[in-house]
Each structure stands twice: as structure tokens, then as C-alpha cells.
Amino acid sequence: MAEERLQKILARAGVASRRKAEELILAGRVTVNGRVINRLGSKADLECDHVKLDGRLLRAPRHMVYLALNKPVGVVTTMHDPEGRLTVMDLIRGVKQRVFPVGRLDYHSEGLLLLTNDGDFAQGVASAAGHVAKTYLVKVNGVLTPAQEREFQEGIPLHGRRTAPAGLRLVKSGPNPWYEVRLIEGRQHQVRLMFRHFGLLVEKLKRTRIGSLELGRLKPGEFRHLTPQEVQRLTRSPETGRG
């Protein structure tokens, strides 16, 4: 097999998405043939070279795994947590293959989360370039004005960069309304920060859909394997986040 960039090798070995793999490399946790590699752009051949993460030899997975999890509130979307909190990996019982989360849901959020050992799949679903929409039900402590709704939909400045066009729909009115939000981006805490831009705080946040895949009847803490058809729809027929 030809040489590949090291972050792609780590993703293909099922240890992390390419984005997270870059962080592992920069942290000096990856070695190739005994030599620490801590810069991006380095290449290796997983079939010929000894590539290790934290001293563990990596191999390409023989079987690709794709999981849908209903992440509960109070669970961390990481492989390990230094504070000892419950992680999504603690909920994946009986899965022999090593998998990792696709994107993230923060500690106080719940809903649909994908896990896999397919780095290319994770990259396509999680990145904005993949144009796979993520849909959320969000309860906030106030109502957006019509002008604010339009600004929310068209994009707002966030950390010096405007957000992509977003879908926004009021689904339940009242002093603490519920909105449906659809995004193609996955910036950290993006939904919460977008509402905060208008002086509103998110009280509850639940992801209900990723692309064509719905949360369905999964109870909090439950997971299931995706069907081949579901995987194919996510990778070949993504929905856009416009709306």
C-alpha cells in the first residue's frame, strides 16, 4: 500500500477522526518506526511501517462499525475523561472493535451521536465540507424577533468568522420557546453561542437528526448498529443545512 498522511492512517486505524488525529500527532503521541512524529504532513505505510499511538501498534480495522447512540445529558463525548466522568465509550457495551465519536455533543446536551472506526466516514459526516445537516430541538429562555431570526438564518459573526446559513423554525411558542435548528457546521458549542449572540440562553438541547438519519425510538443511553443502507445514504446523499 502507498504511503499516506499520518492523520489519515490514524483515522483509518479507527482511533480518531482526522481532525482529532492531527491533535494527537502535534501532542507527540505518535511514533513511526520508533521515532516520535509531532508535525503534520508526515507520511507512512501502515502495511510496512510500525505506527504506534501511545506505544500501541496500530492496524487497519478488518470490519467497519457504524453506531447510532442516544447520548444522555451528563455524559462526555470523549474516549477518556481525566475527571472520571461517564463517557460515551462507557455506554458502548459488547462492541469488540475500537470506535470513536463522530463530532461531539457537549456535557449538557443529548441526542443522536454517531460512533465508528471509519475515519473517512467520520470526516465526511462531521466536516462542513460534507454538507451533512445536523438537526436540533432547542429550548431557550426568550423569543427571537423576526429580524433576529433572519440574521440567525443568514449567518452571524462567531469568533471572527461568519456562520454558514442555518435552518431555524419555531416549533413551540411561549416565554421559553422551542426552536428547530439545522446546521451543516460543527463548531464547538455553536448552537448555544448563536443564541447567546442574541442574549438568549439555551436551557435544553437535543440532536434529533444527522443527514437522513433520525434518532427514532432509541432511549437515552441506548445504541444500535446502522444498516448498510443508512451508511450509504449518509455518505452519498447528504442533506444541506439550508432552510
Image (cartoon, rainbow, N blue to C red):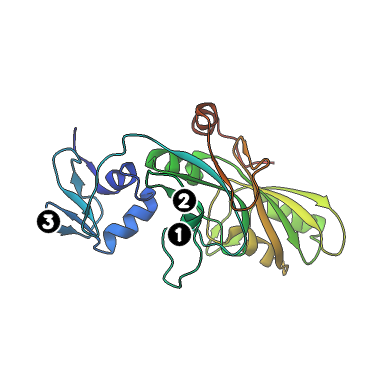
Which residue is at a point 46% across and 70% down the rendered structure image? 84
In primary-sequence order, the first of circles 1 and 2 is: 1
Helix, strand or loop at disc 1?
A: loop
Q: Are marks 3 and 2 in contact (CB under 8 Å)?
A: no
What is the count of numbered marks? 3
Helix, strand or loop at disc 2?
A: strand
Q: Is residue 108 left or right of residue 169?
A: left
Q: In this view, does 15 lie above or below 188?
A: above
Q: Is residue 48 left or right of residue 168?
A: left
Within 10 Å of disc 3 (Cα), the crowding (few <14, some 14-19, many 20+) is few
- 138 or 226, nearer to the observer: 226
In primary-sequence order, the first of circles 3 and 2 is: 3
In primary-sequence order, the first of circles 1 and 3 is: 3
**Residue 58 at what x, y percent from top left?**
24, 47
Which residue is at a point 39% across and 43% down the rendered structure image? 117
Amino acid on which the number 3 mark rests in the picture:
Gly
Within 10 Å of disc 2 (Cα), the crowding (few <14, some 14-19, many 20+) is many
Residue matched to label 2: 101
Residue matched to label 1: 78
Q: Residue 34 carries which label?
A: 3
**Residue 197 at what x, y percent from top left?**
67, 66
